[in-house]
Amino acid sequence: MNVELLLQALREVLSAPSLDAEYLPIDETCIAVPAECLRRAVDVLVGRFRVTHLSTITAEDTGLEIVLLYHFWDRRGLTLRTSLPRDGPHIASLARIIPGAIFYEQEVAEMLGVVFDGHPVAASLLLPDDWEGPPPLRRPTGDDV
Amino acid sequence: MSRITIPIGPQHPALKEPLSFLLTVEGERIVESALRIGYVHRGLERLFQDRSYVQNVHIAERVCGICSHIHTTAYCQGVEALLGLEVPRRALYVRTLLCELERIHSHLLWLGVLAEHIGFTTVFMYAWRDREIVLDIMEDLSGGRVAHAVNAIGGVRIDIENDHIPAIHARLDELERQMEMFLGVIQHERTFQARTRGVGCLTQEQVQRYCVVGPVARASGVAMDIRRDQPYAVYDELSFRVITADEGDVWARTMVRALEIVESMGMCRQLLDKLPEGPLASRAPRRVPAGLVISRCEAPRGELLYVIRSDGSDRPARVKIRTPTLPTLATLKDQLRGVHTADVPTILAGVDLCIACADR
């Protein structure tokens, strides 16, 4: 995987000339993409660059926004970073392009309350069926504190 | 023919850990299956946020009851990268040695479980007896059979005495002889072949679609191994083969794991022979600079991922763990479709699930 070529392709497809890569420790590249472009970015990764291995999706509630990190791997790491608002976060599901994403999206959905549009499964993965209360990895704010 | 739905689990004699299946059968054939996990979810990722970086080493050790050392390796390696800390080479050698001993122990444990599931009790007994050889080595080194508490941020907590090394080699000799016997059984024993050949097949394409890792992926011809492809610790100083097979069935997974044990023994010998002199740990500060790190290791079941984000304090803002079992679980629906009910235990054992790991 050539990061420069990938960046060029992404800039072109997403019409985002300012798109840039950040380099993280342990040979990892991180590219921030807007949430509405994520699916198209993954299409480029899978279709053109044959990067099909999605290691997992990390989600974090920073208190200001919900950050999603899509960790891909092709003999080195590539993370696509995107962020969603804390109120009513939703993003396109990758389940059709990468079936391996189904469990990862299910987990993010139940732990942080992110809705994945077009996700095939509605059930929870880890939490009990009778779980009540806010998604457990959301940071308490305002009245909850 | 009428359809019947059979619940298996979460508590069931054929399951080693709690998970639940709903199998819909027509006669003896499975037509549909549904899977549910989460019965041993302990909220560990949340717990990481409430503990200091040092305390979290002990939590990482307890994510899995089989491969505890690889979890602390991935965690410590991530924190060390955030700190920009150089770990002494002797420490990395000890760390890698434990990783490979753990792989041998995990694969032998698995071989026993598979043998028991196919009704081959003799191999089950022998595999678990011979697993004691490697458990004894680890106990002598660290004091623990499965929870070793060897890793620390910046290095390791144990040393290997020079006069102890010949004894480890002698035990590895003993295990090597036993592995020849196991490989003979796997390759030539008719019962073994009959129960595992053509069972639980996954194609290379299915493996890639579900992002499967580790021996299950390698047994379907996907040569992915973090130790070779993105070397960590001292794997770049060792010579070893990445074992693959093309069949993609339970038999191929058995061969891959058995040959990996042989490779791991070779790596242990190289590590003992090349063990450099020097300190065992670098001093690590309590506070970790703000940043993000993605730490990957090759656990016995495949790619293990620790994502750690630091906000500059003495405890992590977020720790995400992805264990190799989770993607493998996604393939079970495909593997179970259309098979004979008698093959269900073989298929479940064949992929080497670690549910406590997957549930976290």
Image (cartoon, coloured by chain):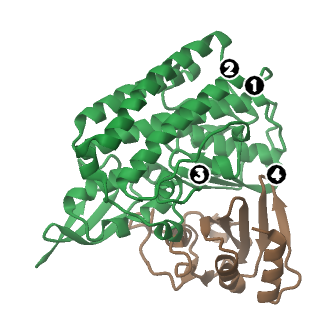
Chain colours: A brown, B green
First in residue order: circle 4 vs circle 1: 1
First in residue order: circle 2 vs circle 3: 2
Residue beneath the point at 26% across and 71% down: B338
Q: How crowded is mark 1: few (under 14 residues within 10 Å), some or many (20 or more)?
A: many
Residue under numbered circle 1: B280
Residue under numbered circle 3: B304
Left or right: residue B121 versus residue A82 is left
The quadrant of the picture occupied by the N terminus of chain A is: bottom right
What amino acid is found at the position of numbered circle 2 in the picture?
A: Asp
Label 4 to label 1: alpha-carbon separation = 26 Å
Q: Where is residue B175 in the image (x, y as percent from the top left)?
A: 45, 25
Whether residues under marks 2 and 3 lie with C-beta atoms below 8 angstroms apart, the answer is no
Label 2 to label 4: alpha-carbon separation = 32 Å
First in residue order: circle 2 vs circle 4: 2
Label 2 to label 3: alpha-carbon separation = 26 Å
Q: What element carries label 2?
A: loop
Whether residues under marks 1 and 2 lie with C-beta atoms below 8 angstroms apart, the answer is yes
Front label number (4 vs 3): 3
First in residue order: circle 4 vs circle 3: 3
Q: Is mark 1 on a helix, strand or loop?
A: loop
Residues tagged by mark 2 and mark 3 found on one chain of the structure: yes
Whether residues under marks 3 and 1 lie with C-beta atoms below 8 angstroms apart, the answer is no
Residue under numbered circle 4: B312
Front label number (2 vs 4): 2
